[in-house]
Amino acid sequence: MTTPLARPKAQWTQPGSEFWAPNRNPVEAAFAMQPAVYADEEFFAAEQERLFGRAWVGVALAFEVARPGRLLVRSVGGRSVLLTRTETGLHGFLNSCRHRGTELAEADCDIANTIRCPYHRWHYSADGQLVSAPMFDTVPRDGFDLADYGLIRVRVDTWGPLVFACLDNDSPPLSAWLGDLGDRMAAYGFEKWHPVELEEAACTFDVAANWKLIVENFAEYYHLPWVHPELAKVSRVADHYRYQGPGMYCGQTTTPVSGDERDDWLKLPAAASLDNSDAASGRFVALFPNVLLAVLPSHMFLMTLQPLGAGRTLEHCTFLFPPGPMTGPEPPAALCESFEITRRFWIEVNDEDIDICERAQRGISLGGAPPGPLAPRFEEPLNRFHKMTADLMTLPCVADLAVPAGDGAENADRHGSEPNPLPPAMELDATASSVQTSSS
């Protein structure tokens, strides 16, 4: 009998492969991805190179490397990457000495503007220039020039509170990767949001599930009534709508965020200058491939996913807040108590998600039933996510990547029982523009 994971491996990265065909259909005719995508270690290795090695991967929070003299060590597509900041900006490098390749740093640290190799003491400035190669002048080497042996650069960029890195120079710039998301969420002013110095405001979870299962679970709301009965009181299924424009992301919004049965979301001070839609909504956005944003008017629950294997992922979780009393030097005690209620609520919801994702991993790995059909009303974001995954795995050159288009201004393009009663400003503008164009 053929095992459920036995698939033609050549098709994983082959353009036009039948392996991905069911995932490329419109959501009404689309299916879930094959078991191997989640459970095969060889697929995971290919994915590290083809997907994480070519995507803009979320690797840090901007505040972690906000000052010169700080060095971060992160993993991208199976490669170790260094992040630094100097007066000239943010920098990224491969974590490998230009002499004989030694790892330069094991963990985040302060460097006083100097990166030293522990092996032969070559040292580099924080902007990656080779400053010294000890004893190379005792027996001079013809043609040796320090300027030729700076650290190998990695593309880095920021959006809002996040730092992204990309190993492939052919990938579109981060601005194109994110599409309209910067404009769509501009009113929040994320670049000014910060964490708080409170116990357990940041935490990491070791999850026995594939990273894609975590993204899929975040992106759909089909499971809410059964997996999250408490969340469903403030994020009701009937109040969910798509929240997607052009860009490498998928998302949904809860509009309005309910406060009739519990008001956890409503006790903390909201960001200033939000419009009526943002002030009444929860935005849930999965930035492809590994960043998950749950944004409320008063706070953000942010997760970055670090895949460690086909069936293991680290979730790095942080709470961020807009400028105001929560980000001051001493948040008021009453707000700290409110945050603790909110924190416990999110962690309980996340624990429920972890449990169901680990159960899904076991079912896929040990059972491996053939993929079933997606539910158009609830799982359209998954269809979008699956197509992005297929594209990164199969494109010969990532420069040819087609960033997904938006949902369109017409209500028929949105999967849901009714039009959003408080559509985001960008969609209102698009609708008005469409009406004006059609009537002119």
Image (cartoon, rainbow, N blue to C red):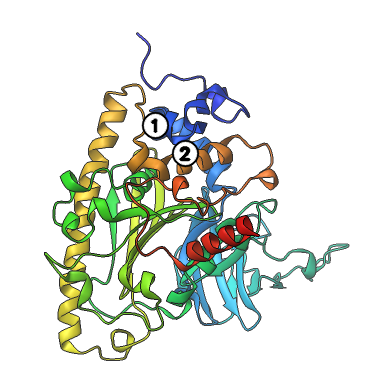
**Amino acid type, residue under disc 2 in the picture:** His
Q: Position of residue 171 (x, y in %)?
A: 65, 52
Could you tell whether 402 is left or right of 64 in the image?
Answer: right
Q: Nearer the viewer, residue 50 or 243?
A: 243
Q: Quadrant of the N terminus?
A: top left
Residue at 53%, 52% (x, y): give it: 406
Residue 17 picture quarter: top right
Q: Nearer the viewer, residue 256 or 309?
A: 256
**Amino acid type, residue under disc 1 in the picture:** Ala
Dot 2 and dot 1 residues touching (CB under 8 Å): yes
Residue at 51%, 28% (x, y): give it: 20
Q: Position of residue 188 (x, y in %)?
A: 43, 75
Q: Is residue 95 visible?
A: no
Relative to 225, residue 430 above or below: below
Residue at 26%, 30% (x, y): give it: 363
Residue that label 1 marks: 32
Residue that label 2 marks: 386
